Image: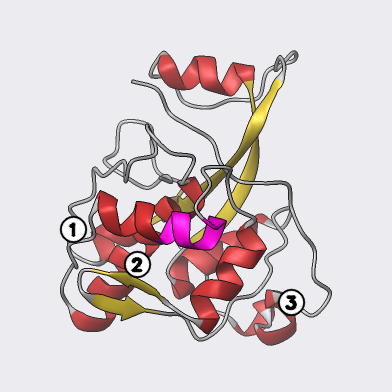
Amino acid sequence: MEYLLGKLPAKIDKRTISLKAILKEELLPELPDSYNIDKALGGINDDNMYANDRYGDCVIAARAHQTLRFEKYEQGIQPKITDEDVVGEYLRESGGADNGLYLLESLKAWRKDGWAANGKTYSIYAFASVDWRNHDEVKHCVHLLGGVNFGMMVYQSAMDQFYAGETWRVVEDPGSYQGGHGVYLYGYGIKENDDGGGGT
């Protein structure tokens, strides 16, 4: 099966609030060694590709994965989000072309207009930038705020590892740059054989 990338290069907007400006780490509860949102919610049924094998819609697919968890947490139910919902939103935000999305612009659209899925409109009140170099800050987002929606640069070594069913790991020569990918992180510190805890 082919998996497509689709996150365009990072855009920076100085108006984006940083998480550390609103959450003071010294006031937060102690982090558990590992945490899995799906387990905390009592289980999530999510083996969806959301057409990311046919479209470069990974930014919206990541949003769909996160929406499943937000709604399970807030409403106690998991909505039925379809490939058609995700592709429709992707093409709406991209202007009809399958050429990827800027993650920041897509987050702004999610906040401003929401997105239609499962016959409803889902939106977020706000988003903040996270210092990815600060692992505790990232973990607090997963533990307290429902996960992290982020973009990453993908190199050939990561694609090779993925298709071989291996865990991603840094290698000395990662090969050529393949593109950007939108990902949703819903757990950390999970052992390799544990069920879940990564990103989709």
Comparing 60 with 35, the one in front is 60
Q: Earlier in the sequence, mark 3 or mark 1?
A: 3
SS of the residue at dot 2?
A: helix
Instruction: Find the distance from the CA under tag 3 to the CA under tag 1.
Output: 32 Å
Q: What is the span of residues highlighted in magenta in the rendered image? A: 89-95
Q: The C terminus is located in which quarter?
A: top left
Residue 85 percent across, percent down from the top left: 29, 59
Magenta span main SS: helix
Q: Which residue is at 64% across, 75% downward?
A: 128
Q: Earlier in the sequence, mark 3 or mark 2?
A: 3
Colour mode?
secondary structure
Q: Which residue is at 30% across, 31% downward?
A: 193
The reply to whether dot 3 and dot 2 touch (C-beta < 8 Å) is no
Instruction: Find the distance from the CA under tag 1 to the CA under tag 2.
Output: 14 Å
Three-letter amino acid code at the position of disc 3: Thr
Mark 1, residue position: 43
Q: Mark 1 or mark 2, which is nearer to you?
A: 2
Q: Is residue 5 left or right of residue 196?
A: right
Q: The N terminus is located in which quarter?
A: top left
Mark 2, residue position: 67
Mark 3, residue position: 16
Q: Which residue is at 23% across, 43% downward?
A: 47
Three-letter amino acid code at the position of disc 1: Gly
